[in-house]
Amino acid sequence: MSDLKQIPVVAKETGKERTNPLANVFDELIRFAQARSMFMLHYCTGCGAIELPPAMTSRFDMERLGIQPMVTPRQADILLITGYVSIKTLKRIILTYEQMPSPKYVIGICSCTVNGGMYWQSYATAKKLNEYLPVDLYIAGCMPRPEAVIEGLRLLMDNIKSGKSEPWKDYYQRYDYYLGNQQHLFGDDWQTPTDIIGEAEHFGLMGPETEGEHTRLLQQHQQPLEPHKMRLK
Ligand code: SF4
């Protein structure tokens, strides 16, 4: 044990790779616990939502995997998008995603989240979810059965356990790309209350594509957000 204490936790040269075997053991333990205790926020955007009740309840019983529904983004680990996404809804999805604590995971259920599905020609729907948010995996189908949903969740669990599910880092490392697509859809004055660049600094995930022309545009338009006035009538 005393020998292990002498080994640095991360490599001195890069400051990233774990060199201490004990640190790797703890990392594995944490990833195992994360994979087996996930709160899922199901953002029921389309018809695919109808497959969730059977996936959650006694027949398929996703709680036996350690996954259970959660009603607020602040405590959620997984954001489930269950079908076509209108442009108005996408704004709410992004606001919700940004409020979730990292690490966080996104699953797109239904073909409509992959490429617009049967709404591919609609003026009112967003076509590829992964242009606006980092998506961990898609469960395709119109609509996918509960078995497919469970299989997708198991795949996500395996990826988390093996440390492969890290698209949430991409949102920080390539924020300018995601923000650019969001601005293209919602207009140049699009803004959210979350300080993504501050979070990227906090996690040490600032990359060459974190900031760029779109984050500069955001800074020009950014206003302090005012709460809506309560309307009693
Ligand atoms: S893929 Fe089919 S079932 Fe799913 S949201 Fe689109 S139209 Fe509805």
Image (cartoon, helix red, strand yellow):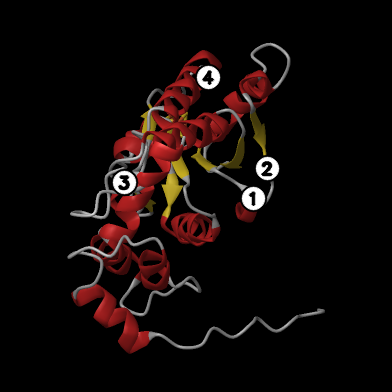
Residue drawn at (52%, 59%) of the image: 92
**SS at mark 1?**
helix
- Dividing the picture into quadrants, the one containing residue 207 is bottom left
Q: Which mark is residue 150?
A: 4
Q: Are marks 4 and 3 in contact (CB under 8 Å)?
A: no
- Dividing the picture into quadrants, the one containing residue 202 is bottom left
**SS at mark 3?**
helix
Going from N to C along the chain, the mark reached first, 3 or 2, is 2
**SS at mark 2?**
loop
Give, as a three-letter code, the residue at label 2: Met
- The residue wearing badge 3 is 130
- The residue wearing badge 1 is 75
Mark 1 crowdedness (10 Å alpha carbons): few <14, some 14-19, many ≥20: some
Using the rendered image of the protein, determine whether residue 80 is visible from the camera's viewpoint: yes
- The residue wearing badge 2 is 70
Place of residue 205 in the rendered image (x, y in percent of width and height, measured from the top left): 31, 60
Place of residue 26 in the rendered image (x, y in percent of width and height, measured from the top left): 48, 36
Foreground tag (1 vs 2)? 1
Q: Are marks 4 and 2 in contact (CB under 8 Å)?
A: no
**SS at mark 4?**
helix
Foreground tag (3 vs 1)? 1
Mark 2 crowdedness (10 Å alpha carbons): few <14, some 14-19, many ≥20: some
Q: Is mark 2 within 8 Å of ligand 1?
A: no
What separation in Å lies between label 3 and label 2 (alpha carbons)?
23 Å
Give, as a three-letter code, the residue at label 4: Ile
Residue 137, placed above or below residue 123: above
Residue 82, placed above or below residue 185: above
What separation in Å lies between label 1 and label 4 (alpha carbons)?
21 Å
Going from N to C along the chain, the mark reached first, 4 or 2, is 2
Q: Is mark 3 within 8 Å of ligand 1?
A: no
